[in-house]
Image (cartoon, helix red, strand yellow):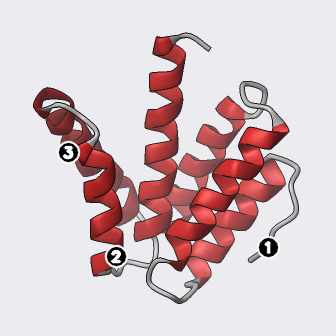
């Protein structure tokens, strides 16, 4: 993958992580730390763009779980043939870690995780 493709992949994974971590409509301090770790990797200009992106993602979250599911399905379909099974498994593990940050699994998180597993033809471990 070239740099542009890697950057786009990173943004899509950020989007998925963000909506998964916030689909329980509770924002734990560990989830906030996770977001800050991601943001710290970017320069100020890119941080501002990511903050705008989170506002867009928040607008999707505000529409409810059905809209979030559609969003995640569209993102996961766009990636299905662009990443291999090892990357899918690695990203699913990352998403699982994000879900477990607040030490509980909300039903919406379970739904989205299983949806990703189904899209990527992987077994769900949640």
Identify the residue under disc 3: 51
Q: Decide which of 104, 37 is in the foreground and name it.
A: 37
- Image position, residue 19 (x, y; %): 45, 59
- Image position, residue 32 (x, y; %): 27, 68
Q: Nearer the viewer, mark 2 or mark 3?
A: 2
Q: Image check: 17 left or right of 46?
A: right
Query: What residue is at 19 percent from the left and 38 percent from the top?
Result: 47
Quadrant that contains the N terminus: top right
Q: Image check: 69 left or right of 47?
A: right
Identify the residue under disc 1: 125
Alpha-carbon span between mark 2 and mark 1: 21 Å
- Image position, residue 64 (x, y; %): 45, 67
Q: Badge 3 local density, few (<14 within 10 Å), some, or many (20+)?
A: few
Query: What residue is at 13 percent from the left and 28 percent from the top?
Result: 45
Q: Are marks 1 and 3 in contact (CB under 8 Å)?
A: no
Q: Earlier in the sequence, mark 2 or mark 1?
A: 2
Q: Earlier in the sequence, mark 2 or mark 3?
A: 2
Identify the residue under disc 2: 30
- Asked which secondary structure carries label 1, the reply is loop
Query: What residue is at 44 percent from the left and 45 percent from the top?
Result: 14
Q: Image check: 71 left or right of 57?
A: right
Q: Is residue 12 visible?
A: yes
């Amino acid at each position: 993958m070239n740099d542009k493709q890697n950057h786009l992949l990173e943004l899509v994974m950020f989007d998925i992580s963000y909506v998964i971590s916030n689909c329980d409509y509770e924002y734990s301090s560990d989830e906030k730390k996770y977001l800050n770790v991601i943001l710290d990797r970017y320069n100020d200009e890119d941080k501002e763009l990511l903050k705008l992106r989170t506002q867009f993602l928040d607008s999707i979250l505000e529409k409810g779980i059905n809209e979030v599911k559609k969003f995640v399905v569209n993102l996961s379909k766009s990636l299905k043939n662009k990443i291999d099974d090892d990357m899918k498994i690695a990203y699913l593990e990352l998403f699982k870690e994000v879900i477990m940050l607040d030490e509980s699994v909300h039903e919406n998180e379970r739904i989205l995780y299983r949806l990703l597993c189904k899209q990527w033809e992987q077994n769900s471990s949640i």
